[in-house]
Amino acid sequence: MMGKSTDTQVIIVGAGPAGAGASFFLSKYGIPHVVIDKETFPRDKVCGDACSGKTALVINRADPEWLNEILDAPQAFTPSWGIKFVAPNGRALDIPFSPKRTPETKAPGFTVPRMVFDDFLFRKMPSPYCTIYQGASITDIERGDNKVTVNMTHNGVAHIVTAPVIIGADGDKSIVHRKFVSDSSQPKAYAVGLRAYYEGVTDMHPDNYIELHFLPEVLPGYLWIFPLPNGMANVGVGLLSEIVREKKINLREQMLHAIKTNPQIAPRFANARLQDKIQGWGLPLATERRPLSGDNYILCGDAASLVDPFSGEGIGNALYSGMLAAMALKEVLPQRDLSAARLRTDYDDVLYKRLGDEFRISATLQRLSKYPWLFNFVVNKAYKSPSLRNTISCMFTDMDLRDQFSKPSFYLKILFNR
Ligand SMILES: Cc1cc2nc3c(=O)[nH]c(=O)nc-3n(C[C@H](O)[C@H](O)[C@H](O)COP(=O)(O)OP(=O)(O)OC[C@H]3O[C@@H](n4cnc5c(N)ncnc54)[C@H](O)[C@@H]3O)c2cc1C
């Protein structure tokens, strides 16, 4: 069979949230691009399946109708109104995302299996500017002459795609990252997570709060229970890889042990049934600033290590970084300047200006959360203090407030009830 060749403006490798986010906005700006994914959609991705306000924000900016579709389909996308923190001493704290909720308020977050959510995004991608190859196998990526060339096989046909720039949105094991980022002096900060789907977990919050259980045996990580449509729940556990290695923790055993014996958790699983095999995957964390682009390439989402170091949230950051990559390319492509220096100012600097504080605060919170006594102290105080509960609630949207959590003065203030 004859090979095919395509010349385009942007090549996106990966059609998950990062690739979809980039594609939506490139299409909005009328920039032709090719999206290549090795999987065929719908496809699964190991995840907690919880989508935050940042996910909603990007989808709304791409097309407000798409967000309405999500919010109007609670049978597919479970609206979530808050979060339950369970301290290492077992005390639970319910924190609403919207303390001033009215009947008109839309749910700030939602949960949805990635099999469904990523397919939703994938089906929104087609546009006159977007050509998609799914089930494609990339055999080589080359850079030369201010141009990137991708060799792939699609439906048994060899295909060459060329463009001035490539976006690596191909997740945690990114081949674009491996090809272009030669500097291995900055080791990746990693967490590892396990996901299990259960049916029949009882006592879920009536407003579908997501639950984080900070069990002493998995600090500074946590066990989560997230409600899903149709009586299902996403249950998992995540912890820093270095701690798993150092302490030789068997995460799977820890999770199953908690489900069987933890006094708060076990009774709720008395009649629950595991629906699928327990699966694990890595979370590349945004613990420090690292280069996100270089000559003729940009990295987004997990390929750029943009997972929140405290919450483990990566879907919103993947979509958001994809959007910022498209915004940067809208400016730089007409000037034909795809140099590392230009992409650093137009992409890296913008991304860190918007998300850098959030990453810094989350990295500090992650370090603090390894101290069970500190956790117990804050939760015990908040349990008795509506104003502290309100402060924690507002922290989901207010970064300055969240910053308070990383300062010793905050803990002194609550110690003395100020
Ligand atoms: C256990 C666990 C729980 C998590 N829980 C949450 C949560 O509740 N909420 C949250 O926001 N985040 C969560 N995350 C993080 C979240 O899953 C990721 O941050 C998010 O999926 C990143 O999106 P992405 O588009 O960058 O990458 P991905 O979603 O991994 O998508 C990458 C795409 O690239 C494709 N691809 C990969 N390699 C190639 C290749 N060689 N050629 C072509 N295509 C390729 C893949 O098929 C895939 O479609 C969790 C992660 C884990 C591991």
Image (cartoon, grey):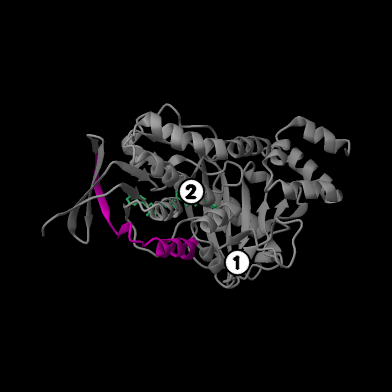
Disc 2: residue Cβ within 8 A of ligand 1's nearest atom: yes
Quarter holding residue 155: bottom left
Q: In this view, does 34 lie above or below 175?
A: below
Residue 131 or 335: which is nearer the viewer? Answer: 335
Left or right side of 58 for 263: right
Residue 106 or 79: which is nearer the viewer? Answer: 106
Looking at the rendered image, the quarter that the N terminus falls into is bottom left
Give how far apart the Cα atoms at labels 2 and 1 are. Answer: 21 Å
Looking at the rendered image, the quarter that the C terminus falls into is top right
Q: Is mark 2 on a helix, strand or loop?
A: helix
Magenta span has 203?
no
Q: Few, some or many C-alpha atoms within 10 Å of disc 1 (few <14, some 14-19, many ≥20)? A: many
Region in magenta: 114-142
Q: In the rendered structure, which disc, 2 or 1, sits on the residue that comes first in sequence?
A: 1
Q: Residue at image x 53%, y 32%?
A: 288
Q: Residue at image x 68%, y 57%?
A: 261
Amino acid on which disc 1 is placed: Thr
Magenta span has 133?
yes
Residue that badge 2 annotates: 318
Left or right side of 238 for 413: right
Q: Few, some or many C-alpha atoms within 10 Å of disc 2 (few <14, some 14-19, many ≥20)? A: many
Asked whether the viewer can see residue 43, the reply is no
Residue that badge 1 annotates: 78
x and y percent of residue 62 in the render? 49, 57
Q: In this view, does 409 lie above or below 29?
A: above
